[in-house]
Image (spheres, coloured by chain):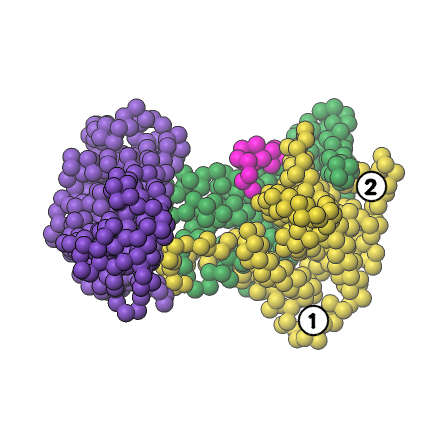
């Protein structure tokens, strides 16, 4: 294990940010800390980096007890949401910073900086100031800067949070490819489930200071531990007291399975290739199902049409506890 | 509006210039040839530079403490730091005399026993000048420290820099201009200090008389020409200071 | 303008409790800074107060109610108060013009505002004397008149209200005014009901500063006023007189009064400052 977090708790005054958190992160893995804002995931990352100290519990990095080590001795690379670029230094000097601090020979620094700028596709921008770069370029520079000191782990705090949707998507594909090239143990914080599902090898879902579930994207999506994880990872709808994915709702124009509920299409909404059908059942439930346009057309669906809905056999769901349903994200 | 500023500031200031040059450059040349005036000018510069150096080191350090640290009594300290701006220069002088006065001061006699004369000597003048200009650097640096935030410093720390390296490589370059403005303003204030220095200096000709004291002295001795010429030199420096600040300072930074 | 702006709101994960974050090194730095500050500022100011009350309350009271001293205090406070009122109005107006109007020579005006800040006070006095003294080209001679005190205060306090109001005015969105006028408010009503309330704390803070500066001024008026007892003598001149007569106790008593005024202004400013930044 590369990072071992044991029984970590942290409060800010009355606010409990983390409560008895245990996480193991394997060497060379790309792990996402996923959860809603204010849930404690950034605090956990900062505790791993040594930028905050835990009230109790321990942190081990690469087998080394790190709980009370200052950040500069943990050998971690940290990438900030707002880049934290050194505004008065050129891109190349930014990347060289950690190496200069370590008093490496000039020639070595130069070679390493060139290599890293190559890696993040910023070779021709080495002499520019950070202010002359776009957001995405600045974040790549920050990444190169963190990688320059050959950290044993790389920590990224909402690395794409400040970027617009298109750049964000490009950059996360690029991060995945970069990780496959560099293989450094990487942990990144995100509140975007799509980002986590797409990029990470392992996802740690954190909510209200507690770990809800740890697993691969498939495990989490297919076998969510509870209704929070299920609803946070994707859209959900309630069908006969169970949370299910709208794309796992089977819709038929005649009663073919015994447990199917009878209802009427109350609304149809087309979003791109997908059709979202809202069904009002005779016993008063409102159920949302999604399907492709072709499916909708072949069923001949229209508002007011009678339909029978049931749970697709074999698909996962989570029983809704008596106190109610969490809002779908 | 413009008329108000013209009558209150522009016209009077321009009159000093014309009066200083009423006889061409002879007035200026006369005072620059007077050894007492030259000595006063030198003393002014030395005292001002000492005070500025002290206030810059103190000001930058204090700003860092007030912005980057939490400690009990911080709010009170940050309010007190502004106090010298609203204390009368005469009261400043009096206060220093009461503590450092050679005969009856709280610490003065002890210091004199050890050979350090403060009041009626240069150290007292440096103290008085440092007192009145104390908040200027802090007031420039504190808002900038707030504005740049801690991101860059934290990033530097995560890259292995220690506090000293962070200060020299990251924080200082970021607050560089604020420090420069603070220093220029302090310099203008220090060169021009009058009341406080008058009380603590003893105003001894050729020894502890500064340029501002020369202006008063010459005026009261009916040497108007000399007074205006010296005043012009002082005004030149201070106006140059604020013009530099307003030119260098980026727009919207106040 | 207080040195310490309140902490900006931060996300919950970064909020720090109000406890000490000092490391041994920064603790040492704080110690040295506070020691120097105490030696330079706090202890001397305490010495003034201690000396003032040393002789007992009655002597203190007798000193500051001495006829000549009282006349000086009255002149100082009245002139400073009058100047403060003028500054509140003119300062706001000047700030308004500087922020809202774009015209040639605005930069020159900006520098003009700062001149009284930078000019040595004795030079400021000389400057005023040249236009409003005995050989005034305007024929206005206020030298040795109580009006000279007012004039000197007016000069040295000019920048305070302007420099406090200006940034607030710059931050103020014009769309608030546009919204008000779209709702049918006249320009005057908009100014009175929408703009003025947001400027009030800044105007008050600037006024407080200019009052404090006025009360404590010495250099700018010493040549202009002639320092005539009962007529143009102000408090700071009176203190200096006592110092020169080696009557430090009397000087300290009057100085204490000025210090109380300065301290009240500091406290007032701190309160106003928090209000200004809350609105921002």
Determine crowd level at label 2: few under 14, some 14-19, many 20+ residues with C-alpha closer than 10 A: many
Distance CA(mark 2)–CA(mark 1): 37 Å
Chain whose colour in the figure is purple: A
The colour chain C appears in is: yellow
Q: Earlier in the sequence, mark 2 or mark 1?
A: 1
Quarter residue A275 falls in = top left
Residue C60: assigned label: 1
Q: Position of residue A136 (x, y in %)?
A: 33, 35
Position of A193 with respect to B58 (left or right) is: left
Quarter residue A263 falls in = bottom left
Question: Could you tell me if residue A213 is visible in this image?
Answer: no
For mark 2, name the chain.
C
Question: SS of the residue at dot 1?
Answer: helix
Determine crowd level at label 1: few under 14, some 14-19, many 20+ residues with C-alpha closer than 10 A: many
Residue C85, placed above or below residue B36: below
For mark 1, name the chain.
C
Residue where numbered disc 2 is placed: C133
Q: Residue at x 66, y 38 (%)?
A: C100
Chain whose colour in the figure is green: B
Residue B220, placed above or below residue A10: above
Q: Position of residue A244 (x, y in %)?
A: 24, 56
Residue A186, placed above or below residue C250: above
Q: Residue at x 66, y 75 (%)?
A: C56
Look at the magenta stretch and give its main secondary structure: helix
> Does residue C25 belong to the magenta stretch?
no
Q: Residue at x 25, y 59 (%)?
A: A261
Q: Position of residue B136 (x, y in %)?
A: 55, 47
């Amino acid at each position: 294990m590369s990072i071992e977090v044991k029984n970590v708790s942290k409060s800010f005054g009355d606010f409990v940010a983390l409560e008895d958190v245990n996480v193991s992160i394997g060497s060379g893995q790309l792990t996402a800390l996923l959860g809603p804002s204010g849930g404690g995931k950034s605090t956990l990352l900062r505790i791993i980096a040594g930028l905050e100290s835990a009230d109790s519990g321990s942190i081990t990095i690469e087998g080394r007890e790190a709980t009370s080590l200052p950040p500069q001795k943990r050998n971690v690379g940290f990438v900030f949401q707002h880049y934290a670029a050194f505004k008065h230094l050129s891109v190349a000097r930014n990347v060289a910073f950690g190496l200069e601090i370590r008093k490496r020979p000039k020639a070595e620094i130069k070679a390493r900086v060139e290599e890293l700028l190559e890696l993040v596709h910023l070779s021709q921008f080495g002499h520019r100031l950070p202010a002359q770069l776009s957001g995405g370029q600045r974040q790549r520079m920050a990444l190169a800067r963190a990688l320059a000191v050959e950290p044993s782990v790389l920590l990224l705090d909402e690395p794409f949070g400040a970027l617009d949707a298109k750049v964000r998507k490009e950059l996360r594909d690029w991060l995945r490819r970069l990780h496959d090239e560099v293989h450094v143990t990487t942990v990144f914080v995100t509140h975007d489930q799509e980002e986590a599902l797409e990029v990470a090898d392992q996802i740690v879902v954190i909510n209200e200071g507690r770990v809800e579930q740890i697993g691969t994207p498939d495990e989490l999506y297919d076998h969510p531990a509870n209704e929070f994880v299920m609803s946070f990872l994707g859209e959900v709808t309630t069908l006969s007291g169970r949370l299910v994915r709208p794309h796992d709702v089977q819709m038929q124009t005649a009663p073919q399975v015994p447990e199917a509920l009878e209802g009427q299409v109350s609304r149809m909404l087309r979003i791109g290739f997908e059709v979202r059908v809202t069904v009002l059942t005779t016993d008063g439930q409102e159920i949302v199902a999604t399907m492709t346009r072709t499916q909708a057309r072949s069923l001949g669906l229209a508002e007011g049409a009678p339909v029978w809905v049931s749970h697709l056999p074999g698909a996962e769901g989570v029983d809704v506890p008596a106190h109610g349903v969490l809002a779908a994200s | 509006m413009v008329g108000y500023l013209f009558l209150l500031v522009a016209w009077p200031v321009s009159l000093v210039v014309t009066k200083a040059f009423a006889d061409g450059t002879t007035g200026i040349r006369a005072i620059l040839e007077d050894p007492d005036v030259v000595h006063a000018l030198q003393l002014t510069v030395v005292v001002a530079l000492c005070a500025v150096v002290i206030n810059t080191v103190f000001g930058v350090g204090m700003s860092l403490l007030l912005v980057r640290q939490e400690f009990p009594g911080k709010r009170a300290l940050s309010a007190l730091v502004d106090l010298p701006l609203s204390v009368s220069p005469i009261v400043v002088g009096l206060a220093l005399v009461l503590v450092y006065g050679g005969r009856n001061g709280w610490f003065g006699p002890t210091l004199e026993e050890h050979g350090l004369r403060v009041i009626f000597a240069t150290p007292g003048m440096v103290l008085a000048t440092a007192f009145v200009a104390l908040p200027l650097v802090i007031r420039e640096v504190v808002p900038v420290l707030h504005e740049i935030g801690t991101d860059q410093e934290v990033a530097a720390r995560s890259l292995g820099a220690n506090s000293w390296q962070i200060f020299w490589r990251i924080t200082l370059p970021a607050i560089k201009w604020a420090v420069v403005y603070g220093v220029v303003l302090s310099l203008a204030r220090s060169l021009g200090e009058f009341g406080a220095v008058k009380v603590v200096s003893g105003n001894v000709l050729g020894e502890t008389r500064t340029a501002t004291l020369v202006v008063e002295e010459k005026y009261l001795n009916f040497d108007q020409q000399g007074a205006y010429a010296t005043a012009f030199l002082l005004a030149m420096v201070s106006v140059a200071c604020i013009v530099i600040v307003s030119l260098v300072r980026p727009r919207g930074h106040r | 303008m207080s040195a310490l702006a309140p902490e900006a709101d931060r996300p919950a994960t970064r909020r720090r409790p109000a406890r000490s974050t000092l490391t041994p090194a920064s603790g040492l730095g704080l110690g040295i800074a506070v020691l120097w500050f105490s030696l330079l500022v706090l202890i001397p100011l305490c010495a003034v107060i201690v000396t003032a009350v040393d002789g007992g309350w009655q002597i203190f009271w007798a000193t500051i109610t001495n006829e000549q001293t009282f006349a000086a205090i009255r002149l100082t406070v009245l002139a400073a108060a009058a100047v403060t009122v003028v500054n509140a109005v003119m300062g706001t107006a000047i700030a308004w013009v500087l922020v809202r109007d774009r015209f040639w020579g605005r930069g020159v005006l900006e520098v003009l505002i700062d001149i009284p800040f930078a000019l040595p006070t004795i030079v400021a006095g000389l400057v005023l004397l040249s236009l409003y003294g005995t050989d005034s080209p305007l024929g206005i001679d206020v030298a040795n008149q109580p009006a000279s005190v007012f004039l000197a205060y007016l000069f040295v306090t000019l920048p305070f209200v302007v420099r406090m109001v200006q940034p607030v005015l710059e931050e103020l969105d014009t769309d608030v005014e546009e919204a008000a006028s779209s709702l049918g408010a006249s320009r005057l009503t908009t100014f009175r009901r929408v703009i003025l309330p947001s400027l009030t704390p800044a105007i008050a803070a600037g006024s407080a500063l200019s009052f404090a500066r006025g009360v404590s001024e010495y250099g700018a008026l010493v040549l202009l006023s002639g320092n005539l007892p009962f007529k143009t003598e102000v408090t700071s001149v009176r203190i200096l007189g006592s110092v020169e007569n080696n009557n430090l106790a009397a000087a300290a008593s009057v100085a204490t009064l000025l210090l109380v005024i300065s301290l009240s202004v500091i406290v007032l400013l701190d309160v106003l400052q928090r209000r200004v930044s809350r609105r921002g």
